[in-house]
Image (cartoon, grey):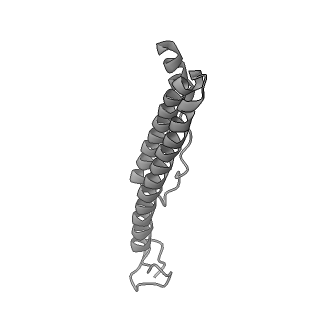
Amino acid sequence: MGIMSLAALAACQSTPTKSSFDNPMFSDETRALEKQLNAEAAAVGAAQAVMSMPAAWDPTGAASLVTTPAGLAMREAQRRQADARMDAQLAKDQAAFYRKYGLNPDGTTTGRKGPLSVD
């Protein structure tokens, strides 16, 4: 059973991928949060795999009635929390971008000169 658990965990591991936020507009905090959220999602997937293994060995199938909804609820809770955290971080990045270039959130100028000003 231990070997199968290790095999399931190894299968959930992936090679590092390129960040979706490799752009000067996004902060290092955003890229770090993305990496952290990816690791949390992988952990949730590994937990789902470990939970489902005993259920797969149940000849009656009754264990699946418990583990399937529990796994889905766990994944949905993690997804909602990750979305909220990333949305908050992106709002911080957008506010910093507007301040840097002297813009209001609606795109109008604040009257301050930005770094690309020719005046």
Q: Position of residue 40 (x, y in %)?
A: 44, 40
Q: How many marks?
A: 0
- Quadrant of residue 102 within the rendered picture: bottom left
Q: Nearer the viewer, residue 45 or 91?
A: 45
In this orientation, does residue 54 appear?
A: yes
Q: Nearer the viewer, residue 92 or 85?
A: 85
Q: Nearer the viewer, residue 36 or 5?
A: 5
- Quadrant of residue 90 within the rendered picture: bottom left
Looking at the image, is 32 positioned above or below residue 97?
A: above
Looking at the image, is 44 positioned above or below residue 113?
A: above
Q: Position of residue 61 (x, y in %)?
A: 60, 29
In this orientation, does residue 15 appear?
A: no
80 relative to 57 in the view: left or right: left
Identify which residue is drawn at 46% across, 44% down: 74
Identify which residue is drawn at 49% across, 57% down: 24
Identify which residue is drawn at 52% across, 52% down: 21
111 relative to 118 in the view: left or right: left
Q: Nearer the viewer, residue 73 or 101?
A: 73
Q: Position of residue 80 (x, y in %)?
A: 47, 55
Q: Position of residue 5 (x, y in %)?
A: 50, 20
The C terminus sits in image quarter: bottom left
Identify which residue is drawn at 45% across, 52% down: 82
